[in-house]
Image: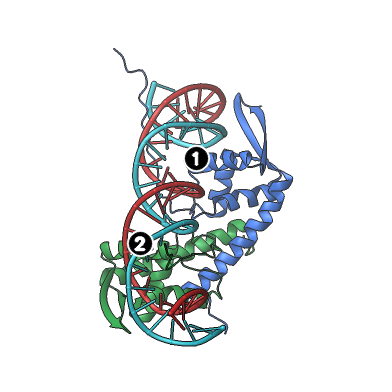
Chain colours: A green, B blue, C red, D cyan
DNA sequence: CTTATATACATAGGAAAATTATGTATGTTG
DNA sequence: CAACATACATAATTTTCCTATGTATATAAG
């Protein structure tokens, strides 16, 4: 008996939580880039954060699917180098949602900075 | 049959997610205040954030219990006005944890600001 | 030719964190 | 005595994410 192929999967597992901001991050990238596909998003996030944040596929793809189901994203597929790419783009509803999410995120960050004393309280 | 007391509970439910930073917030307050009790913490958070963030008890108490079980907090009870107060204070392990959590939070906020373009990228 | 790595998608199972919704009880104010 | 603030607690559920898989092609290294 032969073992023709032995797949060994070693995950880097350096992940440190997205804290509820995954949707906001994806939506913001799509606001700036018109259309993106999943793998591209993971690379962009890695690039911008200097490798600090690695989107796991298990987190990102379900999130994309959900936002599509919720009417915030639309999709189109292309075949590149014999590989399928699924592009995501903001719908009109999605464009409104980005603004809401961004405001919410800013408010949250501001409050967090106050609470953690990272930024000095004015008072 | 009498109904002696009818309790109607109306929650404000204006809550907008703590996004995984509840522990950090509590630990930071305890770093600054030596010892605090649950209700006091909710009031302090409300005060600092101008009412933006309201800690729900259902989130806070289990969080306090967990951190105590994990050895980060110690407790002592006092009786004030016939009401029990349960004070929480940082253990030595807790004091170390605050620093870790604060650094983690700063890194997270920084990355989020980069990704959401709230703070301009230097590059 | 075979292995490793990068590209590219997807889903199932489970853990963690927070919300919602309760429950108990006392003190104060109108 | 009703309403509100003070003060604790927990059960049930939902959301969100991570871990661990699975499939498949292209390319570079050995």
> Which of the pair B37/A15 is nearer the observer?
A15
| Chain ID of residue with mark 1 | B
Q: Nearer the viewer, mark 1 or mark 2?
A: 2
Which quadrant is the C terminus of chain A positioned in? bottom right
Q: Are marks 1 and 2 on the same chain?
A: no
Residue at 59% in and 56% down = A115
Residue B76 image point, x, y percent? 68, 32
Residue C6 image point, x, y percent? 47, 79
Please, is residue B47 above or below residue B5 in the view?
A: below
The residue singled out by tag 2 in the image is A62
Circles 1, 2 touching at the beta carbon (< 8 Å) = no
- Tell me where residue A70 sits by quadrant: bottom left
Which quadrant is the N terminus of chain A positioned in? bottom left
User: Could you tell whether B27 is left or right of A84 in the image?
Assistant: right
User: Could you tell whether B120 is left or right of A83 in the image?
Assistant: right
User: Could you tell whether C1 is left or right of A87 in the image?
Assistant: right
The residue singled out by tag 1 in the image is B57
| Chain ID of residue with mark 2 | A
Q: How many marks?
A: 2
- Tell me where residue B75 sits by quadrant: top right
Please, is residue D27 above or below residue A17 in the view?
A: below
């Amino acid at each position: 008996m032969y073992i023709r192929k032995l797949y060994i999967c070693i995950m880097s597992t350096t992940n440190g939580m997205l804290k509820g901001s995954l949707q906001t991050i994806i939506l913001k990238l799509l606001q700036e880039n018109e259309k993106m596909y999943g793998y591209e998003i993971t690379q962009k996030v890695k690039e911008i954060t200097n490798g600090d944040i690695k989107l796991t596929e298990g987190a990102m793809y379900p999130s994309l699917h959900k936002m599509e189901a919720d009417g915030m994203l639309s999709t189109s597929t292309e075949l590149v180098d014999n590989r399928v790419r699924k592009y995501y783009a903001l719908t009109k509803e999605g464009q409104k949602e980005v603004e809401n999410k961004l405001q919410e995120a800013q408010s949250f960050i501001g409050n967090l900075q106050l609470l953690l004393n990272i930024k000095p309280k004015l008072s």
